[in-house]
Amino acid sequence: MSGQVEAPALRAAAGRPRPAVRFNRRQLEPYALLAPATIFMTLFFAWPALQTLLIAFQSAQGSFTLDNFGAMARDTDFRLAVRNTLLLLVLIIPIETTIALVMAVLAQSRLFGRDVMLYIWSIPLAVSDLAAGLVWFSIFTSHGYLNSVLQDLHLIAHPVGFLDYNNLGGLVTAIVLAEVWRSMSLVMVIIMSGIQAIPPELDEAAESLGAGAWQRFWKVTLPLLKPTLQVALILRTTTAFQVFGVVLALAGSALPVLAVKSESWVTEYRNYQLAATYAILILVLSSLSTVGYLLLLRTPREVFQR
Amino acid sequence: MAEITIESISKSFSGVKAVDNVSLTIHDGEFMVLLGPSGCGKTTLLRLIAGFDLPDAGRISIGDRDVTVSPPGRRDIAMVFQSYALFPHLRVFDNVAFGLRMHHVAREEVTSRVREAAELMGIDAFLNRYPTQLSGGQRQRVAVARALVMRPSVILMDEPLSNLDALLRLQMRAELKHLLQDIKTTTVYVTHDQVEALSMGDRTAVMRDGAILQCASPMEVYDRPGDVFVATFIGNPPMNIVRGVARDSTVAVEGVEVRLPEASNFPAAAEVTVGIRAENIEVHSEPHHGALPATVAVIEPLGSHLLLTLAAGAETIKASVRTDFPVKRGDSVWLELREGSVRLLGAVTESARST
Amino acid sequence: MSAAIRRHRRRASPQRQLAYAAAGLITAFMLFPLYLIGVAALQPRTAVFDYPRALYPSPFSIESVAFFLSATGILPALGRSLLIGVMTVVLALALGCPAGYAIARYRFAGRDLVQLLIVSVRAFPILILAIPLAVTFINWNLYDSVLSVALVHTVMALPLTILLAASVFLRIPSELEEAAMSMGTSRFGAVWRIVLPLSRPGLGAAALFAFVLSWNEVFAAAVLTVRNPTLPAQIVGALGQSPLPFRFAGGLALTLPALVFIFFMRPYLFSAFGQARR
């Protein structure tokens, strides 16, 4: 963070000796300011997170057990839920990151109508996953827009059941499109802020040294974007493990995923142990992916020191 | 090595003329300094030569090639940026090698040329470091090495010393001048620091409002400024500007006549603007023939000399005297304007514009 | 403009044409679904079952929307969503502003740790909280209440609110505060009289972000409510047995506010999501 300014009183205190008590009061100020938020987050974030862990390892009677994990593994759709969640993630993340990179680069170049374009590209930032699911539902449902257009073009004779129970390809395509549509704005904005932090002279220096546009992107921009991409990927992958509303709107229970399983164990069966176990699984998978990105996209510490 | 020819170049940014119909020839091997206050168009002119911006009109050639619309990488130029623009993700070696690799130079030649440039700039010990691990002066050297290694026809420098502290700047100034004299590459150097301009350039082009006011050798620009702006922009303190009345080969300032170095072509008794440098005024503590009576208003000891601010009639004049000159505030003194050093800077009406 | 320069500008255009084509394609991909949900929602209920579907509303009608709004529970759910949104904003700002101020103005031991925690909370699966909180809220008699959902939404919104508030305060020179303090106000007085008025637009944006987050959140709202759901939770609950016009109108109702939200959030998008980089 640049432009950091030390508290004036703190600076003055460092200069000349002061009674120890008053000096301490000054030092305590930031902690006092942070206290409400910290207490709140401890109560409603840290504590419940810990609780989830405990619940997942508890039997219905409250004793320690690993049975919940066995029960989860035996759950009817468990394997499907894991497979589907991973399948969606593996498709969504690379597609949206690539398009978002293109969008960020386009948004940086001085195109006519850039402001309107950026506004439109940002709209999905404020669209929920449920809403995105419903929007794309109007396209993919059997009497929806996609079938209408295909039939008008005489490409199909009867409506195709894209969202049918057994049409895995159709379901996955629809969910991936809706998720990419909804979340690539977020990735674009993160990448754009990363690009804006790269001094324009670096690009000019490379240009004057004979690098073409493509080379400049690969040799200068992309390597410098690595930390930004890392953050975007971590943020998006952890949220993609929790994919929920889009799936409910487009597939209902036809395509089981982890978050939906967890929710249905609470709302339908009041089985908090199993729901918590699913949540813990999601946490473990997200943590693993985060560690993976941290290792994979490591940057030498010297590069971004200031 | 090449000559740069700039013909009637203009460039506006959203309606504001940054460079206005500028023509300039920079000779082969010459060290040309573009000098002016911020916003005068010097950096724009440099960026037009580099090709980062395209002119609205005019022509630029380097050597005998018209490069007006060529991309920067095809102009055979190398640029040193004010912020150095070192690639933070590349080690010093790879920074210096970047341009050679872009031009598909063979691997062994890259290594040998990078080492050669690094030795020349005294950075061979740091080739394995990242730019953030270097001091400001070392980064500056890497930036210069990265430009030199390309063996360009033209080196462009955009205020390369302005991010260094005063002492380092002094040292690098001499070093850069020495280096560029040795390699004899045509150089265009942008600065707002008149001392840099005077000390480094073969010629200095003083710019203002997108136009070149005067382009000449540093001593010429200092000694015979073309107009009031150049006279006051260059030199510390700036040249004294006073009103006078021209009469044949003399000019009268506050009623005291001084001989001019050359006959003026102003009509007799024309009101003119007169310029004289502080060091060309002799201060006498006794009345002196042909000297201007004045009162001491401010005395500033500057180490090597005293700078006096004097009130002479309606004029305020600065003069420098030796530190042992006996003077105190309010003293009456007499100012002798050294013959041959008084400059006529035009009619009064024109000077009203700039002062 | 000289002929050579004009020629050059024209020659450079294929690359730009490609850029325009790509930009146009992406824009179409962004806009078309929004247009289609509008068409689907703004036509008579019966037209929904026409096939093949018309690509424009024929005729234009708000019948579906009216049907959606009059469906059982929708209006109360809308009211709850708004109320929870406002509660989230108030809570997040009340807790986030002091914390943001501490990060912006003080150097203290553990400052980096605080910033790291804030960023990592954002990458933490929030879904993990909902289940024990459901249990806790049952014990506290808060389950199925507006407050319970607002509390969880505040947890989700707080990290971003703190980061935004910090960046807003950072942009206000501390000299202004020092000047006020040198004229005799306390630090609190300086913040109240100088800093807060100056940071109103930025904090307004932070409030909007918190509201949008709450307005859009589905999972916690679905888990923590039974008879008193928010609008998204109500729609999720009704998805299984609802007719098409209900779903389309619901999709439009949830999407339309985004157009307005983003319009006002635009200047702050980078400071909000760019924050993640650090």
Image (cartoon, rainbow, N blue to C red):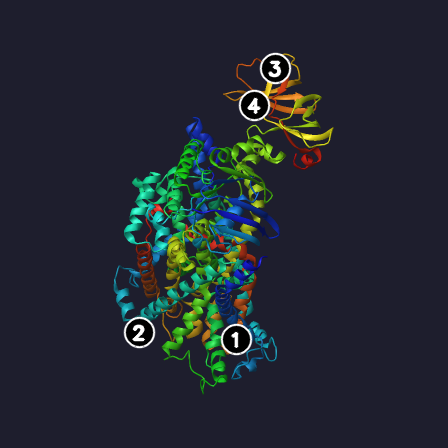
Please rate how many residues cluster around mark 1, counting C-alpha atoms within 10 Å: few if below 14, some from 14 to 19, many from 20: many
Q: Secondary structure at mark 1?
A: helix
Residue at mark 3 shares a chain with residue at mark 4: yes
Relative to B7, is B175 above or below? above
Q: Position of residue A106 (x, y in %)?
A: 48, 61
For mark 3, what is the residue? B284
Task: Determine which of the numbered discs, if any, sits on residue C246 in the image.
Answer: 1
Tell whether label 1 touches label 4 (CB within 8 Å): no
In space, the residues marked 3 and 4 are separated at their CA atoms by 13 Å
| Eye-nearest disc, 4 or 1 | 4
Tell whether label 4 touches label 2 (CB within 8 Å): no
Residue A227 visible, this angle: yes
Left or right of B266, for residue B23: left
Foreground pick, B244 / A214: B244
- Amino acid type, label 3: His
Quadrant of the image occupied by residue A306: top left
- Amino acid type, label 2: Thr
